[in-house]
Image: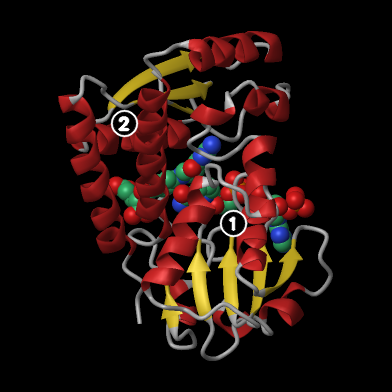
Amino acid sequence: MLMDGTAAAKRIVDQAAADTAALKADGVTPCLATVLVGSDPASVTYVRMKQNRSAKAGIGSWHVELPEAITTRTLVAALTELSQDPDVHGILLQHPVPPHIDERAAFEAIAPEKDVDGVTMHSFAAMAFGEPGFVSATPGGILRLLDEYEVDLAGKHAVVVGRSPILGKPVGMMLLARDATVTYCHSRTADLASYTRQADILVAAVGKPKFITGDAIKPGAVVIDAGYNPGNIGDVDFAGAVDKASLITPVPGGVGPMTIAVLLEQTVAAAKMAQRRL
Ligand SMILES: NC(=O)C1=CN([C@@H]2O[C@H](COP(=O)(O)OP(=O)(O)OC[C@H]3O[C@@H](n4cnc5c(N)ncnc54)[C@H](OP(=O)(O)O)[C@@H]3O)[C@@H](O)[C@H]2O)C=CC1
Ligand SMILES: Nc1nc(=O)c2c([nH]1)NC[C@@H]1CN(c3ccc(C(=O)N[C@@H](CCC(=O)O)C(=O)O)cc3)C=[N+]21
């Protein structure tokens, strides 16, 4: 059975739109600032999708585009300025940034109360310790989708392929918090398929098209394809996986829309909290 991320995301976005309308009636317009370094065409597309989806929910967006050759110091300064801007409620720095930039330093320039994409150490620690805070958007979207389909996580073996700071690592921590037994795999894992074949829940977060093939999937597994490669192609070979999985996310229409939904939901929550502080 397919896990319909588009439908689940719509319910979340509709609620965010209703909350936004109420905030606007009180004189506050939730605003998301998106920051893009360089002009990678895929990243330009993702940022545009986030802005479009924000606009549809009535959320304002403010876009900052910085040249590829920018220094860490200049990027940190731009993010610090947004962190201090009272009209901005949420900040998203598109990952990855060019390799000469210290991505961690840049993420840390985002004020925790505006970290609606959940990328700071503060947010990660809060999530890992079960304290209140913003969750990483894509992992948060994945967990919402699992809940939507009432997937039982406790005691299940979850295998996460990928350990990036915005996706693999936090999704594993969230599954752990829900009592799954978690295995992380990455580029140095020896015999990847021997792990994935044991997964009751398999999360693919690699960035390689059709990398996980049907023979690497345990019959009956729940397969979450977080990959989003050029041409709308996931990290899972869908044709080979669909008959083995009990539940599987399509690409597009699976994890992608859920990511944006959680981002918008958290932007509205940030605006509500800012209003309460006034
Ligand atoms: N739908 C959505 O909202 C989102 C989708 N994505 C998509 O998810 C995918 C992953 O993104 P992201 O996490 O940012 O990517 P990164 O490139 O930051 O991380 C990729 C991870 O995959 C691991 N990896 C690479 N090669 C292999 C291999 N041969 N075997 C096992 N593991 C491997 C890497 O291991 P190592 O750490 O050892 O290098 C790394 O941990 C991409 O397709 C991206 O577009 C990303 C964010 C949001
Ligand atoms: N700091 C950071 N946070 C991110 O969340 C982040 C990031 N960096 N870098 C890039 C990836 C990529 N990403 C996607 C989000 C939504 C869709 C999405 O909604 N896709 C639609 C397709 C829409 C269409 O193609 O028209 C779908 O899958 O159905 C895809 C990809 C977030 N990312």
SS assignment at label 2: helix
Q: Is residue 231 above or below residue 273?
A: below
Which residue bears the numbered disc 1? Answer: 208
Give the residue displayed 52% in from the left and 42% down from the top: 134
Which circle, 1 or 2, is nearer the viewer? 2
User: Where does residue 106 sit, x and y in percent of width and height?
Assistant: 65, 23
The answer to which quarter of the image holds residue 88 is: top left
Q: How many marks?
A: 2
Query: Considering only order in the chain, which callout, 2 or 1, is on the residue closer to the N terminus?
Result: 2
Query: Assess mark 1: CB under 8 A from ligand 1?
Result: yes
Residue at 75% x, 72% y is 192
Which type of secondary structure does the marked residue at label 1 adopt? loop
Q: Which color scheme did the rendering employ for the protein?
A: secondary structure
Q: Position of residue 35 (x, y in %)?
A: 48, 22
Q: Amino acid at mark 1?
A: Lys
Left or right, 216 with reference to 134 = right
Q: Is residue 34 visible?
A: yes
Which residue in the rendered view is the most extreme toward the bottom? 219
**Residue occupied by mark 2:** 51
Residue 98: tell me if it is visible.
no
Identify which amino acid the numbered label 2 is placed on.
Answer: Gln
